[in-house]
Amino acid sequence: MDLRHLNYFLVLAEELHFGRAAERLHISQPPLTRMIQQIENDLGVTLFERTKRSVKLTPAGAELWQDAKQMLLQMQTVKKRLATHGQGQTGTLKVGYVGAVMHSALPSILAGFAKNYPNLKLHFEEQPNLNLVHELNNATLDVAFVRTWLHAENLQEDLILNEPFVAILPENHALAGKEKIKVKNLKQEKFITFTRECGPTIFDSFVVLCAQAGFTPHILHHASQLNSVLRLVESGFGISLLPQHVQNGYNLKVNFIPLEDASENIPLLMLSRKENPNPALLNLRSYLKSSNGEKIMN
Protein backbone atom coordinates (compact mmCIF):
# COMPACT_ATOMS: atom_id res chain seq x y z
CA MET A 1 0.00 0.00 0.00
CA ASP A 2 1.57 3.27 -1.12
CA LEU A 3 0.84 6.81 0.07
CA ARG A 4 -1.83 7.36 -2.56
CA HIS A 5 -3.71 4.27 -1.35
CA LEU A 6 -3.30 5.44 2.23
CA ASN A 7 -4.75 8.83 1.40
CA TYR A 8 -7.76 7.26 -0.36
CA PHE A 9 -8.44 5.13 2.71
CA LEU A 10 -8.14 8.09 5.10
CA VAL A 11 -10.52 10.28 3.11
CA LEU A 12 -13.15 7.53 2.95
CA ALA A 13 -12.69 6.81 6.67
CA GLU A 14 -13.38 10.48 7.41
CA GLU A 15 -16.35 10.86 5.07
CA LEU A 16 -17.85 7.36 5.43
CA HIS A 17 -19.49 8.03 2.09
CA PHE A 18 -18.05 6.91 -1.26
CA GLY A 19 -19.59 9.79 -3.21
CA ARG A 20 -18.29 12.55 -0.95
CA ALA A 21 -14.88 10.88 -0.62
CA ALA A 22 -14.55 10.55 -4.40
CA GLU A 23 -15.48 14.21 -4.79
CA ARG A 24 -12.76 15.26 -2.29
CA LEU A 25 -10.23 13.10 -4.14
CA HIS A 26 -11.31 14.51 -7.53
CA ILE A 27 -12.03 11.07 -8.95
CA SER A 28 -15.21 9.16 -9.81
CA GLN A 29 -16.69 6.67 -7.38
CA PRO A 30 -15.85 3.39 -9.23
CA PRO A 31 -12.04 3.89 -9.12
CA LEU A 32 -12.29 4.66 -5.40
CA THR A 33 -14.32 1.50 -4.81
CA ARG A 34 -11.74 -0.58 -6.73
CA MET A 35 -8.90 1.04 -4.79
CA ILE A 36 -10.48 0.22 -1.40
CA GLN A 37 -11.11 -3.35 -2.51
CA GLN A 38 -7.48 -3.66 -3.60
CA ILE A 39 -6.29 -2.39 -0.19
CA GLU A 40 -8.53 -4.88 1.60
CA ASN A 41 -7.27 -7.71 -0.62
CA ASP A 42 -3.66 -6.72 -0.01
CA LEU A 43 -4.16 -6.61 3.78
CA GLY A 44 -6.45 -9.62 3.92
CA VAL A 45 -9.07 -7.84 6.05
CA THR A 46 -12.35 -5.99 5.57
CA LEU A 47 -11.95 -2.31 6.39
CA PHE A 48 -15.49 -1.03 5.77
CA GLU A 49 -18.97 -2.42 6.38
CA ARG A 50 -21.02 -1.39 3.34
CA THR A 51 -24.77 -1.28 3.05
CA LYS A 52 -27.02 0.59 0.67
CA ARG A 53 -27.56 3.22 3.37
CA SER A 54 -24.24 3.48 5.20
CA VAL A 55 -20.51 2.90 5.29
CA LYS A 56 -18.85 2.08 8.61
CA LEU A 57 -15.32 1.22 9.70
CA THR A 58 -14.75 -2.33 10.87
CA PRO A 59 -12.55 -2.85 13.97
CA ALA A 60 -9.65 -3.55 11.61
CA GLY A 61 -10.48 -0.40 9.66
CA ALA A 62 -10.60 1.70 12.84
CA GLU A 63 -7.18 0.38 13.88
CA LEU A 64 -5.72 1.11 10.44
CA TRP A 65 -7.25 4.60 10.53
CA GLN A 66 -5.31 5.47 13.69
CA ASP A 67 -2.08 4.05 12.29
CA ALA A 68 -2.61 5.64 8.88
CA LYS A 69 -3.10 9.11 10.34
CA GLN A 70 0.19 8.74 12.24
CA MET A 71 2.00 7.40 9.18
CA LEU A 72 0.77 10.27 7.02
CA LEU A 73 1.78 12.83 9.65
CA GLN A 74 5.25 11.30 9.86
CA MET A 75 5.62 11.37 6.09
CA GLN A 76 4.57 15.02 5.95
CA THR A 77 7.17 15.80 8.62
CA VAL A 78 9.83 13.96 6.61
CA LYS A 79 8.86 15.84 3.45
CA LYS A 80 9.14 19.18 5.23
CA ARG A 81 12.51 18.26 6.72
CA LEU A 82 13.85 17.10 3.37
CA ALA A 83 12.56 20.25 1.71
CA THR A 84 14.53 22.43 4.14
CA HIS A 85 17.55 20.16 3.60
CA GLY A 86 17.27 20.77 -0.12
CA GLN A 87 17.27 24.49 0.59
CA GLY A 88 20.44 24.19 2.68
CA GLN A 89 18.64 25.03 5.93
CA THR A 90 19.26 21.69 7.64
CA GLY A 91 21.88 18.98 7.46
CA THR A 92 25.60 19.28 8.09
CA LEU A 93 28.33 21.54 6.71
CA LYS A 94 31.85 20.23 7.31
CA VAL A 95 34.22 23.19 7.66
CA GLY A 96 38.01 22.93 7.61
CA TYR A 97 40.46 25.70 8.39
CA VAL A 98 44.09 26.53 9.09
CA GLY A 99 44.76 27.93 12.54
CA ALA A 100 45.69 31.38 11.21
CA VAL A 101 42.14 32.11 10.04
CA MET A 102 40.91 32.02 13.63
CA HIS A 103 42.80 35.29 14.15
CA SER A 104 40.49 37.17 11.80
CA ALA A 105 36.88 38.23 11.55
CA LEU A 106 35.94 34.75 10.29
CA PRO A 107 34.78 33.21 13.62
CA SER A 108 32.26 36.01 14.21
CA ILE A 109 31.09 35.81 10.59
CA LEU A 110 30.49 32.07 10.90
CA ALA A 111 28.70 32.66 14.21
CA GLY A 112 26.34 35.05 12.39
CA PHE A 113 25.76 32.46 9.67
CA ALA A 114 24.99 29.80 12.31
CA LYS A 115 22.38 32.10 13.90
CA ASN A 116 20.70 32.55 10.51
CA TYR A 117 20.58 28.77 10.01
CA PRO A 118 19.93 27.32 13.49
CA ASN A 119 19.00 23.87 12.15
CA LEU A 120 22.23 23.50 10.17
CA LYS A 121 25.08 21.75 11.99
CA LEU A 122 28.61 23.09 11.48
CA HIS A 123 31.45 20.63 12.10
CA PHE A 124 34.94 22.18 12.36
CA GLU A 125 38.32 20.62 11.69
CA GLU A 126 41.77 22.26 11.82
CA GLN A 127 44.33 20.97 9.31
CA PRO A 128 47.38 22.21 7.35
CA ASN A 129 46.79 23.56 3.85
CA LEU A 130 47.65 20.37 1.95
CA ASN A 131 45.51 18.21 4.22
CA LEU A 132 42.55 20.52 3.65
CA VAL A 133 42.96 20.26 -0.12
CA HIS A 134 43.14 16.46 0.16
CA GLU A 135 39.98 16.26 2.29
CA LEU A 136 38.08 18.63 0.00
CA ASN A 137 38.94 16.50 -3.02
CA ASN A 138 37.87 13.37 -1.11
CA ALA A 139 34.57 15.05 -0.14
CA THR A 140 35.25 14.60 3.59
CA LEU A 141 35.06 18.41 3.88
CA ASP A 142 32.55 20.78 2.27
CA VAL A 143 34.56 23.97 2.63
CA ALA A 144 37.93 25.14 3.94
CA PHE A 145 39.27 28.54 4.95
CA VAL A 146 42.94 29.32 4.32
CA ARG A 147 45.31 32.28 4.27
CA THR A 148 47.07 31.55 1.00
CA TRP A 149 46.23 31.13 -2.68
CA LEU A 150 46.61 27.41 -3.42
CA HIS A 151 45.20 27.23 -6.99
CA ALA A 152 44.32 23.58 -6.45
CA GLU A 153 42.74 21.72 -9.35
CA ASN A 154 38.98 21.11 -9.08
CA LEU A 155 38.64 23.58 -6.20
CA GLN A 156 36.94 26.96 -6.25
CA GLU A 157 38.70 29.80 -4.43
CA ASP A 158 36.52 32.66 -3.16
CA LEU A 159 38.23 35.73 -1.70
CA ILE A 160 36.43 36.62 1.54
CA LEU A 161 38.54 39.60 2.56
CA ASN A 162 41.98 41.19 2.32
CA GLU A 163 43.82 42.29 5.46
CA PRO A 164 46.64 44.83 5.68
CA PHE A 165 49.91 44.12 7.43
CA VAL A 166 50.74 45.66 10.79
CA ALA A 167 54.09 45.93 12.52
CA ILE A 168 54.28 44.01 15.80
CA LEU A 169 56.84 45.39 18.24
CA PRO A 170 57.64 44.84 21.92
CA GLU A 171 56.23 47.53 24.18
CA ASN A 172 59.66 49.01 24.96
CA HIS A 173 60.71 49.30 21.31
CA ALA A 174 61.76 52.79 20.17
CA LEU A 175 58.99 52.84 17.53
CA ALA A 176 56.28 51.28 19.71
CA GLY A 177 54.62 54.64 20.42
CA LYS A 178 54.18 55.59 16.76
CA GLU A 179 50.70 55.78 15.23
CA LYS A 180 52.07 54.50 11.93
CA ILE A 181 55.41 53.21 10.68
CA LYS A 182 57.03 53.20 7.26
CA VAL A 183 58.39 49.80 6.24
CA LYS A 184 61.75 51.37 5.31
CA ASN A 185 62.21 52.42 8.93
CA LEU A 186 62.40 48.73 9.86
CA LYS A 187 65.43 48.02 7.70
CA GLN A 188 67.80 47.35 10.62
CA GLU A 189 65.36 45.19 12.57
CA LYS A 190 65.54 41.47 13.22
CA PHE A 191 62.34 39.71 12.16
CA ILE A 192 60.36 36.81 13.57
CA THR A 193 58.05 35.32 10.94
CA PHE A 194 56.15 32.23 9.90
CA THR A 195 57.91 29.52 7.95
CA ARG A 196 57.04 29.70 4.28
CA GLU A 197 55.64 26.17 4.48
CA CYS A 198 53.04 27.28 7.05
CA GLY A 199 52.07 30.56 5.40
CA PRO A 200 53.45 30.98 1.87
CA THR A 201 51.33 34.03 0.99
CA ILE A 202 52.09 35.77 4.29
CA PHE A 203 55.80 35.03 3.97
CA ASP A 204 56.07 36.02 0.29
CA SER A 205 54.09 39.24 0.81
CA PHE A 206 56.29 40.12 3.78
CA VAL A 207 59.43 39.68 1.66
CA VAL A 208 57.87 41.78 -1.14
CA LEU A 209 57.04 44.58 1.32
CA CYS A 210 60.64 44.72 2.47
CA ALA A 211 61.95 44.59 -1.10
CA GLN A 212 59.68 47.47 -2.09
CA ALA A 213 61.12 49.42 0.84
CA GLY A 214 64.64 48.77 -0.43
CA PHE A 215 65.98 46.02 1.81
CA THR A 216 66.16 42.29 2.41
CA PRO A 217 64.83 41.40 5.88
CA HIS A 218 67.13 39.88 8.47
CA ILE A 219 65.02 36.94 9.64
CA LEU A 220 66.19 35.77 13.02
CA HIS A 221 63.72 32.93 13.41
CA HIS A 222 60.98 31.11 11.48
CA ALA A 223 58.11 29.83 13.64
CA SER A 224 55.21 27.54 12.79
CA GLN A 225 52.77 28.88 15.41
CA LEU A 226 51.43 32.42 15.78
CA ASN A 227 51.79 32.27 19.56
CA SER A 228 55.51 31.51 19.14
CA VAL A 229 55.97 34.53 16.86
CA LEU A 230 54.21 36.86 19.30
CA ARG A 231 55.99 35.56 22.40
CA LEU A 232 59.40 35.93 20.75
CA VAL A 233 58.50 39.51 19.78
CA GLU A 234 57.25 40.19 23.30
CA SER A 235 60.55 38.89 24.70
CA GLY A 236 62.54 41.30 22.54
CA PHE A 237 64.14 38.90 20.07
CA GLY A 238 62.81 40.80 17.07
CA ILE A 239 59.70 42.27 15.42
CA SER A 240 57.19 40.91 12.97
CA LEU A 241 54.92 41.98 10.12
CA LEU A 242 51.63 40.07 10.15
CA PRO A 243 47.94 40.49 9.18
CA GLN A 244 46.02 43.07 11.19
CA HIS A 245 43.67 40.77 13.07
CA VAL A 246 46.33 38.52 14.65
CA GLN A 247 46.04 40.76 17.72
CA ASN A 248 42.59 39.30 18.44
CA GLY A 249 42.61 36.89 21.36
CA TYR A 250 46.02 37.81 22.79
CA ASN A 251 46.99 39.96 25.75
CA LEU A 252 50.74 40.31 25.36
CA LYS A 253 53.16 43.15 25.90
CA VAL A 254 53.43 44.01 22.22
CA ASN A 255 52.12 46.89 20.12
CA PHE A 256 50.32 46.50 16.79
CA ILE A 257 51.08 49.50 14.58
CA PRO A 258 49.68 50.14 11.06
CA LEU A 259 52.12 50.54 8.19
CA GLU A 260 51.96 53.71 6.08
CA ASP A 261 53.27 52.37 2.79
CA ALA A 262 52.30 48.69 2.69
CA SER A 263 50.85 47.72 -0.68
CA GLU A 264 50.63 44.00 0.11
CA ASN A 265 47.52 42.41 1.68
CA ILE A 266 46.84 38.97 3.10
CA PRO A 267 43.80 37.12 1.73
CA LEU A 268 41.26 35.08 3.61
CA LEU A 269 40.00 32.47 1.16
CA MET A 270 37.21 29.94 1.09
CA LEU A 271 37.96 26.73 -0.80
CA SER A 272 35.32 24.27 -1.98
CA ARG A 273 34.89 21.55 -4.58
CA LYS A 274 33.35 23.00 -7.71
CA GLU A 275 30.83 20.15 -8.01
CA ASN A 276 29.90 19.95 -4.30
CA PRO A 277 26.11 19.32 -4.19
CA ASN A 278 25.60 20.42 -0.56
CA PRO A 279 23.00 23.25 -0.78
CA ALA A 280 24.18 24.64 2.58
CA LEU A 281 27.44 25.58 0.87
CA LEU A 282 25.55 27.88 -1.49
CA ASN A 283 23.93 29.58 1.49
CA LEU A 284 27.30 30.05 3.18
CA ARG A 285 28.86 31.52 0.04
CA SER A 286 25.90 33.86 -0.41
CA TYR A 287 26.08 34.93 3.25
CA LEU A 288 29.78 35.70 3.02
CA LYS A 289 29.35 37.67 -0.19
CA SER A 290 26.50 39.66 1.31
CA SER A 291 28.75 40.72 4.22
CA ASN A 292 30.14 44.07 3.07
CA GLY A 293 33.74 45.06 3.79
CA GLU A 294 32.94 47.10 6.88
CA LYS A 295 30.99 44.24 8.44
CA ILE A 296 33.77 41.75 7.76
CA MET A 297 36.66 43.87 8.90
CA ASN A 298 35.08 45.08 12.16
Image: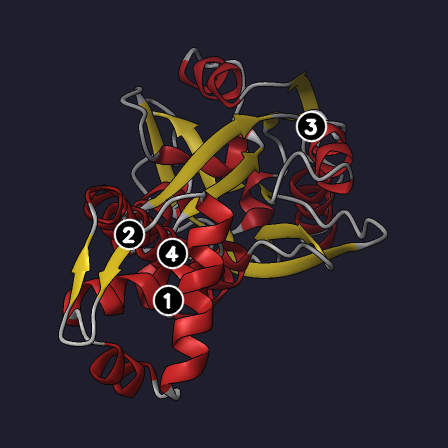
State left or right for residue 275 relative to residue 232: right
Q: Please give the name of the residue rendered at 25% of the width and 46% of the height, measured from the top-left corner.
A: 70
User: Looking at the picture, how far across and down is residue 133, in whole percent?
Assistant: 75, 38
Of discs 1 and 2, which sits in the foreground? 2
Tell me which numbered mark, 1 or 3, is placed earlier along the sequence.
3
Residue type marked 1: Ser
Of discs 1 and 3, which sits in the foreground? 1
Residue picked out by circle 1: 291
Q: Please give the name of the residue rendered at 64% of the width and 26% of the height, measured from the top-left corner.
A: 194
Residue picked out by circle 4: 89
Q: What whole-number distance in Å separates the C-alpha atoms at marks 4 and 2?
A: 14 Å
* Residue 241 shows in the view: no
Helix, strand or loop at label 2? It is: helix
Q: What whole-number distance in Å separates the C-alpha atoms at marks 1 and 3?
A: 28 Å
State left or right for residue 2 relative to residue 28: right
Of discs 3 and 4, which sits in the foreground? 4
Residue type marked 4: Gln
Determine contact: label 3, label 2, CB under 8 Å: no
Helix, strand or loop at label 4? It is: loop
Q: How many marks?
A: 4
Q: Tell me, for residue 112, which label it has, or none.
A: 2
User: Looking at the picture, how far across and down is residue 68, in whole percent?
Assistant: 29, 50
Q: Please give the name of the residue rendered at 68% of the width and 57% of the height, measured from the top-left corner.
A: 157
> For this rendering, which residue is in front, 271 or 54?
54
Tell me which numbered mark, 4 or 2, is placed earlier along the sequence.
4
